[in-house]
Amino acid sequence: MATKFWDKEAETMSRADIERRQLAGLKVAVARALQTPFYKPRLEGVGIKGPDDIKSLADLQRIPYTTKDDLRKAYPYGMVAVDRRDIVRLHASSGTTGTPTVIYLTQKDVARCADFMARSISATGADANDVFQNVVNYGLFTGGLVMHYGAERVGMLVIPSGTGNTSRQIKFMKDFGTTTVHATPSYLLHIHSKLAEEGVSPGDLKLKRAFCGAEPYTEDTRRKIEGLFGIEVFNSYGLSEMNGPGVAFECERRDGMHLWEDGYILEVIDRASLESVPDGELGELVLTILCREAMPILRYRTRDLTSVYPEPCPCGRTHRRIARITGRSDDMLIINGINVFPSQIEEVVMAMPEVGTNYLILVEKQGSLDKLTVKVEVGPGQFADDSRPLNALRERIRARLQALISINPHVELHEPGMLPVSEGKAKRVIDERAKL
Ligand code: AMP
Ligand code: ZN
């Protein structure tokens, strides 16, 4: 099959051209960063007072890393580099509450996101002949709007169906002849499990391909979805801090994701030494976004673990490929596509005076979806004949957790001393999904 390019010149440019673009982009990004209250002291502290202090790509190494915590510290406008009037949109990381990590876009930034997205979509073979159902959350999450704009840019007929209401999703797929879907792998499997109930078989659908991302999944899961629906599944990687989807995407070869290096500088570092690792070796992905006006982010530690493919891709694209994300270097859980930190759960649970000293977070598969259970020990003397106070407490914990993490958990209350206690470091999270 002939490869479809969206922007052949950009997608196949030589390494020297990519690096020339990166250097020019880095100078601009640094100049913008120097306009922000967050980066100005940081950059000046390492002797970078203007874009001319960046003489080669090696100068990137002088810039300190940026973390999610930094984004929270700079909240709300500490990393904004443009006049407030030039910002047209904001997005936030999924599931973050308390202080969210927010990113901002100008009109030009919105257009650029759509371009990178259009490149990614075209690399899968999709085009204006396709009917595209965008089965992800359309709120602050970038996966909805950013993917949507890119799909429109390509000319696909876009159904902004969002998540939930599975029987309506199936009806839309069938009635509109959806050929391409974007969904988390777990939700797509869930949709498959409901097809029979709706009297639909995969053969009744015109589905050809799916873009799956937002959460880690294995090669086996990809093959399972492909087999069940009779489609091709393309891995899609992005994070809100870097504009969401369209950072790295699989081409028709479905073997590693091209990371658009004229838009981002990629580094893979060793988690302990924080030094770069050679191509092919697993490490934490660090990204610098080169072409965002509203909010520069330099050397962002994504916490995602991956490696760079050493070989060029036979498709002809020169932008290097990264391997499937195998995990994270922090304790963030991704539950049905929503990011959750165990500390957020602890905050809610431990703020309740009725709660004792121990709790446990359990994540399991229920069908193809993830299920979150929070087990909590109550203080002494609370398990009495009248179960109403405990039921009310359970409901209070559930409701607060749901408000904070956007996931409805199953809450269990236990008598003091009933949950396992570990002698060393407390093991508060049990993720049964990994065992599948
Ligand atoms: P968010 O900022 O809410 O879009 O979440 C971004 C995070 O989702 C990333 O840092 C990854 O941990 C995860 N993620 C996104 N796409 C993928 C993917 N294709 N495979 C594995 N994890 C992913
Ligand atoms: Zn390729």
Image (tube, rainbow, N blue to C red):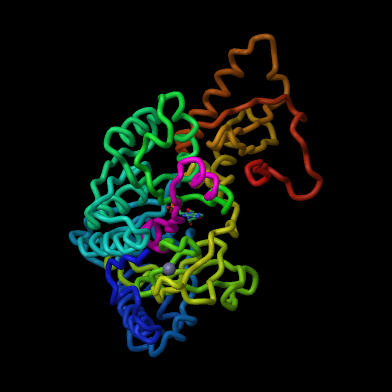
Could you tell me how many numbered marks the image carries? 0
In the shown orientation, is residue 107 left or right of residue 63? left
| The C terminus lies in quadrant | top right
| The N terminus lies in quadrant | bottom left
Q: Residue furthest right?
A: 423
Q: Residue furthest left?
A: 85
Q: Quadrant of ligand 2?
A: bottom left
Q: Position of residue 421 (x, y in %)?
A: 78, 39
Q: Residue at x 57, y 52 (%)?
A: 218
**Which quadrant of the structure image shows residue 125?**
bottom left
Return the residue nearer the eye: 339 or 235. Answer: 235
In the shown orientation, is residue 133 left or right of residue 372? left
Return the residue nearer the eye: 89 or 123. Answer: 123
Q: Position of residue 384 (x, y in %)?
A: 69, 13
Q: Position of residue 231 (x, y in %)?
A: 44, 47
Return the residue nearer the eye: 399 or 334. Answer: 334
Numbered range of the magenta stretch: 222-248
Q: Residue at x 47, y 35 (%)?
A: 192
**Which quadrant of the structure image shows residue 258?**
bottom left
Query: Is the residue 265 above or below the residue 201 in the image?
Result: below
